[in-house]
Image (tube, rainbow, N blue to C red):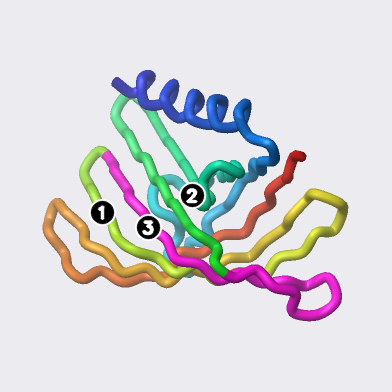
């Protein structure tokens, strides 16, 4: 089961990446002090032209532990703030599935980003998140999902 999930995640990125006109791949590191990301503390992110969403996927598997986090965000506003500093605001959803937990909800990604070199985006993102947790049931849950990362945009 665990190997199947990993293979599906890899296939997702390969299929969408191969069919895209331009796409981006990146890594986000959770900021644990702020609430971290759903799932593991490191996520791969990807965006393809055919879909309006930027997806994030993180997976941790061992013999006794499983943790999967997925985000899907639509950045409806991407603007220059000043000089090389830009920002984006979006709306999205998250799901976290683990050995002993399950959570899902909505998030509002807010980020500052720069392109230090052509096509390389470096970002700091905070995403207030409202959701529901299971095992035990908790509603509403509120936290701030934080990430620091980079994405390389291919053409």
Residue range corresponding to the magenta coloring: 77-98
- Please indicate, yes or no, whether residue 33 appears anywhere in the rendered image: no
Tag 1 secondary structure = strand
- How many numbered badges does the structure rendering display? 3
First reached walking from the N terminus: tag 2 or tag 1:
2
Q: CA distance from mark 2 to mark 1?
A: 15 Å
Residue at image location 66% in from the left, 72% down from the top: 87
Q: In the figure, residue 154 lies in which quadrant?
A: top right
Quarter of the image where the C terminus is located: top right
Q: Calculate the distance from the C-alpha at mark 2 to the C-alpha at mark 3.
A: 17 Å
Local packing at callout 2 (Cα closer than 10 Å; few below 14, some 14-19, many 20+) is some
Residue 103: give its label: 1
Residue 124 placement, left or right of 129: right
Badge 3 density bin: few <14, some 14–19, many ≥20, Cα 10 Å: some
Q: Please name the residue that numbered disc 2 is placed on.
A: 41
Apparent side of residue 86 relative to residue 26 in the rendered image (left or right): right
Residue highlighted by disc 3: 93
Residue 128 lies, in percent from the top left, at: 42, 72
Examine the rendered structure and indicate whether residue 54 appears above or below residue 140: above
Tag 3 or tag 2, which sits nearer the N-term? 2
């Amino acid at each position: 089961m665990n190997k199947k999930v990993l293979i599906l995640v890899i296939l997702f990125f390969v299929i969408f990446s191969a069919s895209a006109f331009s796409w981006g791949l990146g890594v986000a590191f959770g900021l644990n002090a702020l609430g971290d990301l759903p799932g593991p503390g490191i996520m791969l992110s990807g965006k393809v032209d055919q879909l309006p969403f930027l997806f994030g996927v993180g997976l941790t598997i061992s013999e006794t532990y499983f943790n999967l986090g997925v985000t899907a965000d639509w950045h409806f506003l991407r603007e220059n703030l000043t000089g090389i500093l830009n920002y984006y605001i979006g709306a999205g959803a998250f799901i976290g599935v683990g050995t002993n937990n399950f959570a899902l909800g909505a998030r509002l990604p807010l980020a500052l980003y720069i392109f230090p070199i052509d096509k390389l985006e470096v970002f700091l993102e905070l995403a207030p998140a409202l959701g529901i947790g299971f095992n035990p049931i908790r509603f509403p849950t509120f936290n701030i999902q934080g990430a620091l990362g980079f994405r390389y945009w291919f053409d």
